Image (cartoon, rainbow, N blue to C red):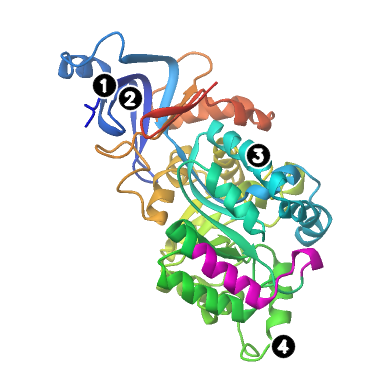
């Protein structure tokens, strides 16, 4: 067995711990042994404590840069990379005009493979090494994604059996049989993924949920993104046997077995108190997508403002995501910025960058159940981190000021957030260097 080697990384360091707490080192040392975090401490103390192990070859100085945990990036459609900056006057029209025609192309194996190679390299370059992802309906696209993705991800092929374009419509048996096949092949990495209640029949959701629960797989779908969507969903289901008296969008998912501790509901903007109680009782998590929900002038869909304080009042777990291509950019820095900016008037004290960082890292790991091995810099966790140069003078006193300094200058050049990560490290090895 090869002897594990030390690696020492010096720079500013942020270590998220909760919504309100983030360790800040103005001159810190991240100690890595093999593929694990060994220590995190001030640089002078690190020099003293590791005087026998540290040398000029294994000490890397990230001058004027911050080292922070890699991101968890939830609720994104990797097959929508080409349409994320397209006009979005309304959700349903955007789907019909841009999204569905693009997703049809992923039936072609070579096309899917080429796109997967490009997309997941871009994702690693933005510092994301975990989360939950939507693919197209096609087995070829899901297999391509599984091959290229790096990190702690669950991925699912969307299931579409009704109210969908002919080219993207499966029979119920096709959806169920493919779910069985993919769970058998990928196990817990597969995520059962009805696109949303509008496109997926109750039979498929019920049987697929049963299969996913039996295999301890995650489940994901959309919930209450817009009022128009909610009205449309209820108009469909109240005409279906067994759903005539259904009260809410959430009730539909409850009746079909979609809720639970491994269930991820994207958006959750327009939820009643009763629905939130149901989500809390079933331990279902919500994924907030601020850049997708943002006003149309900000390249979002204008879906509304997510009331995170109400979500927390009902003790429903949540993390940040993007709903790419509803969200226009891949970087979680842009998502964090959008979360803070949209809540400036309503909850300025609670909607901080410290909170946004936690909800983009450790909170996501907790929801996926992998927080014991990744999510922040606790000893013996995997060495998964990113490095970001800090603009201007290093005159910051805490993590909040540091994150503001990084994010602030690019608010009007949002695409540039995708270029600010200089290094991405996965299990102690750099998989991206700019």
Looking at the rendering, the stretch of residues picked out in magenta corresponds to 164-183
What residue is rendered at 43% in x and 59% in y?
188
Q: Earlier in the sequence, mark 4 or mark 2?
A: 2
Q: Is residue 188 magenta?
A: no
> Which residue is labeled 3 in the image?
329
Circle nearer the N terminus (3, 4): 4
Q: Could you say whether the residue bearing mark 3 is in a helix, strand or loop?
A: loop
Q: Nearer the viewer, residue 87 or 428?
A: 428
Assess disc 2: are there few (<14), some (14-19) or many (≥20) residues with their C-alpha within 10 Å of its C-alpha: many
- Name the mark nearer the viewer: 1 or 3: 3
Q: Residue furthest right?
A: 97
Q: Which residue is mark 1?
A: 42
Q: Are marks 1 and 2 in contact (CB under 8 Å)?
A: yes
Q: Secondary structure at mark 4?
A: loop
Q: Position of residue 60 (x, y in %)?
A: 36, 15
Which quadrant does the N terminus fall into? top left
Of callouts 1 and 2, which one flags the residue occurring earlier in the amino acid sequence? 2
Which residue is under mark 2? Answer: 25
Q: Residue 348 shows which numbered tag?
A: none
Residue 411 is left or right of residue 318, and the answer is right
> Which residue position is annotated with label 4?
239
The answer to which of 421 and 191 lies nearer the viewer is 191
The span from disc 1 to disc 3 (Cα, nearest Å) is 34 Å
**Residue at disc 2, secondary structure:** strand
Q: Residues within 10 Å of mark 4 (few under 14, many from 20)?
A: few
What's the CA distance linking mark 1 and mark 2? 6 Å
Marks 4/2: CA–CA distance = 59 Å
Q: Quadrant of residue 84?
A: top right
Residue at image coords 75%, 64%: 168
Residue neighbourhood size for the residue with mark 3, other residues' Cα within 10 Å, grouped as few (<14), some (14–19), many (≥20): many
């Amino acid at each position: 067995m090869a002897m594990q080697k030390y690696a020492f990384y010096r720079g500013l360091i942020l270590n998220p711990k909760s919504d309100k707490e983030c360790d800040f080192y103005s001159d810190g040392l991240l100690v890595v042994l093999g593929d694990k975090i060994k220590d995190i401490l001030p640089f002078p103390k690190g020099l003293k404590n590791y005087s026998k192990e540290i040398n000029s070859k294994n000490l890397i100085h990230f001058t004027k840069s911050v080292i922070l945990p890699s991101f968890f990036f939830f609720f994104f459609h990797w097959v929508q990379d080409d349409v994320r900056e397209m006009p979005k006057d309304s959700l349903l029209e955007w789907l019909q005009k841009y999204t569905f025609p693009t997703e049809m192309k992923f039936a072609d194996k070579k096309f899917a493979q080429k796109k997967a190679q490009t997309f997941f390299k871009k994702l690693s370059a933005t510092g994301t090494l975990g989360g939950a992802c939507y693919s197209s309906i096609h087995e070829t696209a899901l297999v391509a994604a599984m091959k290229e993705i790096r990190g702690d991800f669950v991925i699912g092929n969307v299931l579409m059996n009704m109210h969908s374009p002919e080219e993207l419509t499966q029979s119920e048996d096709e959806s169920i049989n493919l779910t069985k096949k993919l769970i058998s092949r990928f196990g817990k990495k597969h995520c059962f993924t009805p696109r949303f209640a509008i496109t997926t029949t109750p039979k498929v959701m019920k049987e697929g949920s049963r299969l996913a629960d039996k295999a301890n797989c995650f489940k994901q779908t959309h919930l209450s993104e817009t009022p128009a969507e909610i009205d449309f969903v209820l108009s469909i289901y109240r005409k279906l046997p067994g759903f005539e008296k259904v009260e809410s969008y959430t009730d539909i998912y409850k009746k079909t077995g979609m809720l639970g501790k491994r269930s991820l509901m994207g958006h959750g903007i327009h939820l009643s108190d009763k629905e939130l109680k149901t989500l809390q009782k079933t331990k279902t998590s919500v994924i907030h997508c601020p850049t997708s929900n943002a006003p149309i002038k900000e390249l979002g869909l204008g879906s509304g403002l997510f009331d995170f304080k109400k979500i927390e009042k009902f003790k429903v777990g949540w993390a940040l995501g993007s709903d790419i291509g509803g969200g226009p950019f891949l970087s979680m820095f842009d998502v964090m910025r959008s979360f803070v900016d949209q809540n400036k008037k309503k909850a300025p004290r609670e909607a901080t960058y410290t909170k946004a960082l936690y909800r983009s890292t450790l909170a996501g790991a907790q929801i996926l159940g992998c927080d014991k091995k990744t999510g922040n810099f606790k000893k013996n966790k995997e060495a998964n981190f990113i490095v970001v140069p800090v603009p201007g003078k290093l005159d910051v006193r805490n993590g909040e000021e540091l994150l503001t300094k990084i994010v602030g200058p690019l608010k009007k050049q949002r695409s540039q957030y995708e270029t600010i990560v200089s290094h991405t490290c996965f299990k102690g090895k750099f998989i991206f260097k700019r």
